[in-house]
Amino acid sequence: MLIIDQATYDAIVAHARRDHPDEACGVVAGPAGSDRPERFIPMLNAAMSPTFYEFDSGDLFKLYKEMDERDEEPVVIYHSHTATEAYPSRTDINLAQEPGAHYVLVSTRDGADSPAYDGPVEFRSYRIIDGAVTEEEVQIVPNNRGDN
């Protein structure tokens, strides 16, 4: 199960809406071994595409170096789908290289990209290990830190 605070959830959804019609992507880091998503890190989709995301290799290198220095790891790796459901594509599955991470997908299809949209946002989390996709429950908890 992914347990995520409301502020981080809201930040991921806002990033997905802001980058629409391109896919948004980013990471939520947390203390190594904790499974606690604490530090929201929106990234640039270097592909600038509505159907594909790619982290900039230089930005990703800097992020992993910074996480290493802070004794953190990627707890959540997220991106959006702009025209399809929030389910990993074959490409997403092939790119999943962090077996301990929660892979979050947000769909901004059917008008969900608009801040005025008042329907539910499709926000789903998966574990992807060796090509096997397992959906997991998402529990949104109240904000418990002042840093988000």
Image (spheres, rainbow, N blue to C red):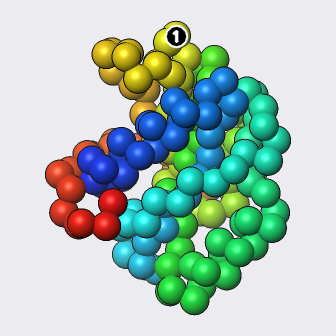
**Position of residue 72 measured from the top left corner of the image (x, y, whole percent):** 50, 79
Closer-to-camera residue (28/126) = 28
Residue at horizontal 46 percent and vertical 59 percent from the top: 40
Q: Along the line of sight, which residue is nearer the eye, 102 or 79?
A: 79
Where does residue 31 sit, x and y in percent of width and height?
Answer: 42, 78
Q: Is residue 19 visible?
A: yes
- In the displayed structure, 73 sits above or below 126; it is below
Q: Residue furthest top?
A: 110
For the point 57% across and 89% down, the residue is 69
The residue at the point 36 percent across, 42 percent down is 10
What element does badge 1 sit on? loop
Asked if residue 37 is positioned above or below residue 80 in the image, the reply reads: below
Q: Residue at x 82, y 41 (%)?
A: 47
Side of 79 where 144 appears, left or right: left
Q: Locate residue 41 relative to residue 121 in the image: left or right.
A: right
Judging by the rendered image, the residue that carries numbered circle 1 is 110
Answer yes or no: is residue 135 visible: no
In the image, residue 3 above or below residue 15: below
Query: In x, y percent, where is residue 24?
Result: 62, 40
Judge whether 60 appears above or below 77 on screen.
below
The amino acid marked with disc number 1 is: Asp
